[in-house]
Image (spheres, rainbow, N blue to C red):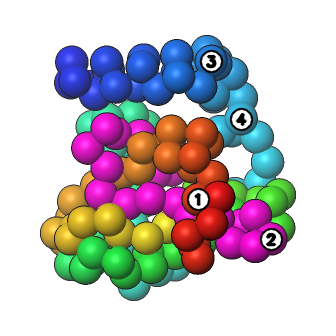
Amino acid sequence: MSKETTFGFTKMLRDLNITKEQLNTVTHHGKVIEFKSDLYYKQKSNIHGYGVFALKHIEKGDVIGIGSIDNKYKTTLGRFTNHSNLNNAMFYYLKNDDVVMVATKNIIKNTEILINYRDHVLNKIYLNGNR
């Protein structure tokens, strides 16, 4: 991890008032449902473990996919998307509290898709704009 990425991750943990171990417990909890997608793929990340990467150019505002199902199961996006303060996507909540990922910037093919964990944990934003 770069110095900036490490600092951003540490600050995010402080903001959420959790330890890295607690985050890992939450992240690794529950079944992961892996979908095939024509927008992203999973591979080793230079940031941490595995990450998700753009399979083709993704436009700002495009829905990339679903991150959780029935508030019980994570998808590839929900489990393997890494944190960055320089995020290019964001999770939005649906009425049933499932989350969908939307590109917040244009994402070039083979670029890692990144979210800022603070956005969907501290600022629960619904797809229609409500909190």
Q: Which label sits on residue 96?
A: 2
- For image coordinates 57% across by 18% down, the residue present is 20
Q: Which residues are magenta?
A: 79-99
Q: Nearer the viewer, mark 3 or mark 4?
A: 3
Query: Pointer 3: what residue?
Result: 17
Q: Which is nearer the N-term, disc 1 or disc 3?
A: 3
Give the CA separation, mark 1 to mark 3. Answer: 20 Å
Measure how far apart labels 2 and 1 are at the Cα level: 13 Å
**Residue 104 highlighted magenta (yes or no):** no
Would you call the spot at circle 1 few (<14 residues within 10 Å), some (14-19), or many (20 or more)?
some
- From the image, tell me which residue sits under label 4: 26
Q: Are marks 2 and 1 in contact (CB under 8 Å)?
A: no
The earlier-in-sequence mark between 3 and 4 is 3
Rounded to the nearest angstrom, the CA distance separating label 2 from label 4 is 20 Å
Q: Residue at x 79, y 48 (%)?
A: 30
The amino acid type, in three-letter code, at marker 3 is Asn
Considering depth in this image, is 113 or 87 the residue closer to the camera? 87
Q: Assign the N terminus to one quadrant of the image.
A: top left
Circle 1 is placed at which residue position? Answer: 125
Label 2 is placed on what type of residue?
Asn
Q: Is 93 one of the magenta-colored residues? A: yes
- 112 vs 70, left or right, is left
What is the three-letter code of the residue carrying label 4?
Val
**From where the camera sits, is residue 6 visible?**
yes
Marks 2 and 1: which is nearer the front?
A: 1
CA gap, disc 3 to disc 4? 14 Å
Residue 37's disc is: none
